Amino acid sequence: MPRISVIIATHNRADMVRIALQSLIEQTVNRAAFEVIVVDNASRDHTASMVAEMSARMPHLRYAREERLGLSWARNRGLAEAQAPYIAYLDDDACAEPVWVDALLAALESPSAPQCVAGPVYLNWNGLPQNVPARYWSLLSYVHYGDRDRPLTATEYVVGANMAFDRAALDRVGGFPTNLGRHGSKLLSGEEAQVVAQIRAGGGEVHYAANAGVFHIVQPDRVKRVWLWRRMFWDGASQPVLDGAARQPRSYCALQAYRDVKRIGFFILRSAAACFCRDRDGRLDCALRATQRAGRLRTHLRLLLGVAS
């Protein structure tokens, strides 16, 4: 039986997955130590045939198909298919460093026995212009918490591009919430944060493995400002779901929507003032904060009207 299952969820990105799989072929750990599961999330491209082709070079590679569209559905299908006591997730547009699996196993099997482990995520700009300000790189899944292994604090986040779990802990929290996570054009996020919060609430530790690094390929559309605006909008739209607004009375959502409108107006005025003062960074930051609040407003209004988020 493998010690860890590596799950790659994908939707219409066969050629990207091929690159990710190549990085797993080059792992330093013995191949018997891990299995790889590609979860094809309702793709209409050549993902299935690509995986069949790669399996000739990767006997520990398996294929599963999940027709319910959504990243959380795909991740949960991978969890159901996995055979190992530990589960690792790698994005379909990420490449693992050669010691990635080794470093994850060392952390998970250490005496401290963390129930969740995250590693650094570096950005591979792939020759694209770095138009996204560095202070927003976290929206591209950039993570770096230093060069030593250590427990993560409650304010330090885990991203889906590079995370691993004790299988039993992930099962206990019910896997990833399917009302969050990417779904078609909806960039809802926060599913990892909710899982990690539940693990912490149950007494589990979350650790950082400095050598378990991956490179996340920045896609061409993500260096355009329109992507940054969309990402901030959906980041805001995810927050009421994470905060449990769906479990609150409609009067709560109405109050929150009112507050959202006030904050949007505030940030628009601040952005206009920054423009007048020729403060480009301040103008951008306030405008993006207004956009993020607009996302919160969108979800609060939908909950108020009884519409699914």
Image (spheres, grey):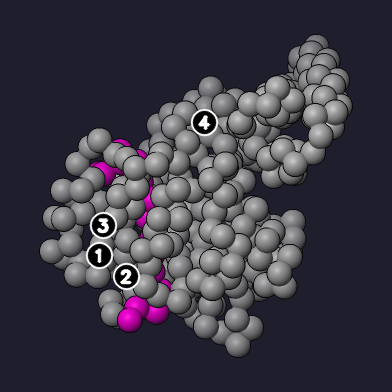
Quadrant housing residue 44: top left
First in sequence, mark 4 or 1: give its number: 1
Q: Is residue 220 magenta?
A: no
Residue 188 locus on image (x, y percent): 57, 37
Q: Amino acid at mark 4?
A: Lys
The dot on residue 63 is 3
The dot on residue 35 is 2
The quarter in which the C terminus is drawn is top right
Q: Which one is nearer the viewer's eye here, 47 or 139? A: 47
The residues tagged by marks 4 and 2 sit, at their Cα atoms, a distance apart of 31 Å
The residues tagged by marks 3 and 4 sit, at their Cα atoms, a distance apart of 26 Å
First in sequence, mark 3 or 4: give its number: 3
Q: Secondary structure at mark 4?
A: loop
Residue at image location 30% in from the left, 50% down from the top: 65
Q: Secondary structure at mark 3?
A: strand
The reply to whether residue 125 is in sight is: no
Residue that numbered label 4 is attached to: 186
**Label 3 with label 1: CB-CB less than 8 Å:** yes
First in sequence, mark 2 or 1: give its number: 2
The reply to whether residue 306 is in sight is: yes
Residue that numbered label 1 is attached to: 61
Residue 221 locus on image (x, y percent): 43, 29
Residue 186 locus on image (x, y percent): 52, 31
The residues tagged by marks 3 and 1 sit, at their Cα atoms, a distance apart of 7 Å
At label 1, counting other C-alpha atoms closer than 10 Å, the crowd grade (few under 14, some 14-19, many 20 or more) is many
Write the start and end of the magenta stretch as one range. 1-15
The residues tagged by marks 3 and 2 sit, at their Cα atoms, a distance apart of 11 Å
Q: Is residue 4 magenta?
A: yes
